[in-house]
Image (cartoon, rainbow, N blue to C red):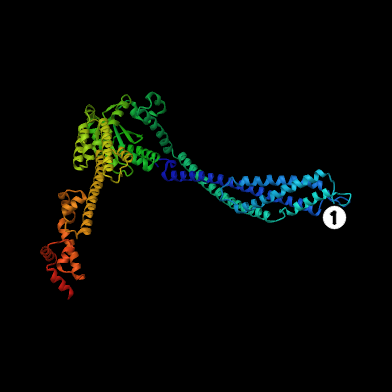
Amino acid sequence: MHISMLKNELYNRILLASIIVVLALSISMIVIGKRVIIFHQLSIKGLAVIDSWNGMERIKNDFLINRSNITVAGEFDYKKNVASWKKQTENFQVTFQDLLEKIGKIPMREGSFVDIQAALIIWNSSHASISRVQEALEQLERVGLDTLVFPQLIHNFYILRNTEKIDFEDTVLLMNLINQFAFLDISSKEFSRLIKGYVSDIQKKNESYIQKLTILTVLMLIFLFISVFIIFFSLQKLHESGLDVSQFKRGEQLKTLRRFITGHESFNNIIDRLNIKEFPILSGYQVIPILMRINHFTAEKEKLGPTEVGSKILVYVSTLEKHLFTKNLLSTVIPLEEGLIIYHMIQGPLLAESITQRTENLLKAIKDFISVQKDFSFSLTYGLTHQFPEEVQENYLELYEASFYRIIFGYDKIISTEEMKSRKLSDGPYPLQQEKQLTESLKQGKIDRAKEIYSLIFRELTQSNYTALKNGINRLIIVITSALDTLEKFNNLSNNIDINAFNYKIHSMETLDEINHAVSGLIDQVAGELVLKRDNYTFHQVGDINEIIQKEYSNPNLSTNLIAERLRFSTAYLGRIFKNQTGTSVQDTINQCRIEAAKDLLIKEKLTIAEISSSVGISNTMYFYTLFKKFYGTTPKEYRQIQKK
């Protein structure tokens, strides 16, 4: 094994998937658990509403039929029930309102809201009656009566009215109270039925959510077990394999070394964190640096993700070092963000070779390694031999800058920093005059001329150093896209250019061939739209000409000049576009239309030849004969005779 089980791609993906599933299940359990609590509270509040409603029912019945609070003398002590009624009605209002507020806090799809709405209607209709009953009770209480004989009062109203126990006004109050209670419609069982239906629905939903919660809990435990097992198994393998542990430690040391090479940290700060024995290049040897940059790095990072790209680069570190070691080319390979950097030590018996020969052998070995890789392709840049670590940061910067010149040479060229140094002196002026010509050509739709100027500008830019080249390309792309956008708008084309998207696409390209191909494709796209637009315009013009001929062929004055004047074209332009589109002249088309109309008249109408000739716009009968014979090979008279047979 070259890498630990923890870094194994399959195990990593399983572990990551398990953690994501556990997190998703945890969130789902929290959401469902909250629903379970809410539904449980709703059930309790619903049952409390039913109990409170039934309490009001009992107190009402006590008033009407004297089922409780009867004195020894058989009288009804109403005062006890007055207080109970008031307390019970207030309790019910609070309980029912509490239930309604709780219901409003959950999504409308939950619960039997039809039942709740119906129960609310019943309560609203009963509330007014309850208020009137309360007023009657308060009046009765102000009278000061202690006890009442309700049954006798109801059945012997006129007799009891004259007794000493109650006077006439008190009797009226009592009868008013009895009437209010009689009309108070809380004795209906409909309200309780509706609330019970709602509670039953809530309890069913609660049971369903509890089942889901149970299932999710079991699934989460399963995935937790999988995650723990993978981590434990991977750590066990790490513990058993000294090679894997050393690989992990070396990976951390490589990251430290990379910070020094790229100029993010000084050598003195990192020396204590490195194992000198594992990096003999730190002992002051001369080294040959080679930079391997991933081709299409931006696209690879978007496709795989930065983490996956980094993992694959780490795999290349150890495999490339072993490959070079087998070639007697002792080297240290260090991972970078977008590739690898190789430091090959110049030492040992091979010193008899020249530096040039050693560099060629090293590059050949690296190319052999790259040729069998399937994950990435690489561009190679090599630098001058220098002392490690004294000159490494300066030489790395030169190496990295030189690698950008693959934009000119493409991916196959191996670039040398020494060769590229001369280009830094070339920073000529940007070809502004040619840019202006390019813009004018594009806006005028002169596509071939624009492409020619574009190629000239590009040839000039490639003679500059990388910074001038890149800035020039960026400016040129903006100029081209802007001119093409203007061309599309001026000609009312489809305006399919997404300038931002195109610029992003160009910036991700790494060679001039890719950039030229993309720019040429964009120019050709707009050119094609322009040609199609122009062809369509000509097609509509020819259609207008034909429409005039069909409608006015009987006009003896109809001619090419008349149609050109009607459409506001020159006669020459009209004749040219019509001939190009139809292959025949305007006058021949007029004559053909007239003769075809005359042919129908010869068959269907009993007109003379002269009358038919005149009706189709030909005043000269002899000329009509000549034209008819030209088109049909016979005279009009002969044609009519043939058709009658």
* Residue 415 position in % (x across, y down): 24, 34
Whether residue 637 appears in this view of the structure is: yes
Which quadrant: the C terminus? bottom left
Viewer-closest of 195 and 216: 195
Counting from the top left corner in percent of width and height, residue 428 is at 21, 28
Instruction: Tell me what residue is drawn at x 36 percent, y 43 percent.
Output: 303
The amino acid marked with disc number 1 is: Tyr
**In the displayed structure, does residue 307 sit left or right of residue 454?**
right
Q: Is mark 1 on a helix, strand or loop?
A: helix
Residue 539 appears left or right of 211: left
Callout 1: few (<14), some (14-19), or many (20+) C-alpha neighbours within 10 Å?
A: few
Residue nearest the viewer, comparing 222 with 640 = 640
- Dividing the image into 4 quarters, which one contains the N terminus? top left
Residue, disc 1: 158
Query: Above or below — where is 295 with respect to 124?
Result: above
Give how far across and how far down residue 559 sits, in percent. 16, 55
Q: Which residue is drawn at 74% across and 48% down?
A: 133
Q: In the figure, 110 relative to 463: above or below?
A: below
Q: In which quarter of the image is residue 477?
A: top left
- At which x and y percent is residue 392? 31, 27
- The image shows residue 275, relative to residue 366, as above or below, that is above
Is residue 102 shown left or right of residue 167?
A: left
In the orientation shown, which residue stands out farthest toward the bottom? Answer: 645
The one of 272 and 43 positioned closer to us in this rendering: 43
Q: Does the rendering let one see residue 431? A: no
Q: How many marks?
A: 1
* Residue for point 32% across, 24% down: 390
